[in-house]
Amino acid sequence: MKGIWGKFKQLPDVLRRQVTIRCGLGTVILLLSIILWIITGEVILALPGLALTAFLLVSGILLGLRCLSDSYIRITGMVTTVELTSIRKKPKSLCLAVEGRTVQFPITQRIENITEGDHLTLYLSPATPIYEQEGTYRIFACLAIERPTKNH
């Protein structure tokens, strides 16, 4: 067990955080569902929480196993274009310059103060489809997005 825990601690911070959040949130919702079931005596009221618990725990465990077996792709590049939402002016999608190619992907997690010229790292599943359109590679899902620290 020490080997698995040691390998988990060596994962990139964003992947470790994703696994921890999914499993932790699934556990909390499981406890709340059980409490709701005990208080009301109706299992039907606890079923949505139990279904969400199952989804989060399975998702977290599968992501953890994928990460522990080093079955993910790491793409690092420089931000060339930031597309903002029209109303709140938050990042909607980004274009990265990766080894002479342009990769476009939507922002699915909060990234503060992203500007052109910043460096980002994307973590992808090997099964993630990548589409080419007009010389740009488009990715519609990623495991995590990391902004390397400025100290490097």
Image (tube, rainbow, N blue to C red):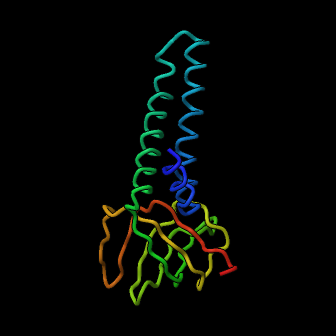
Residue 58 placement (x, y as % from top left):
42, 40
At which x and y percent is residue 60? 47, 45
Residue shown at 47% from the left, 34% from the top? 52
Residue 139 falls left or right of residue 4? left
Q: In which quarter of the image is residue 89?
A: bottom right
Who is closer to the viewer here, 112 or 125? Answer: 125
Locate the C terminus and report the quarter of the image it occupies: bottom right
The number of numbered discs placed on residues in the rendered structure image is 0
The residue closer to the viewer here, 94 or 14, is 14
Residue 136, x across and y down, in percent:
36, 81
Residue lying at the far top in this picture: please name it: 41
36 horizontally vs 44: left or right: right
Q: Nearer the viewer, residue 71 or 115?
A: 71
Residue furthest to the front in view is: 2
The residue drawn where x is 48% and y is 78% is 76
Say above or below: 101 vs 41: below
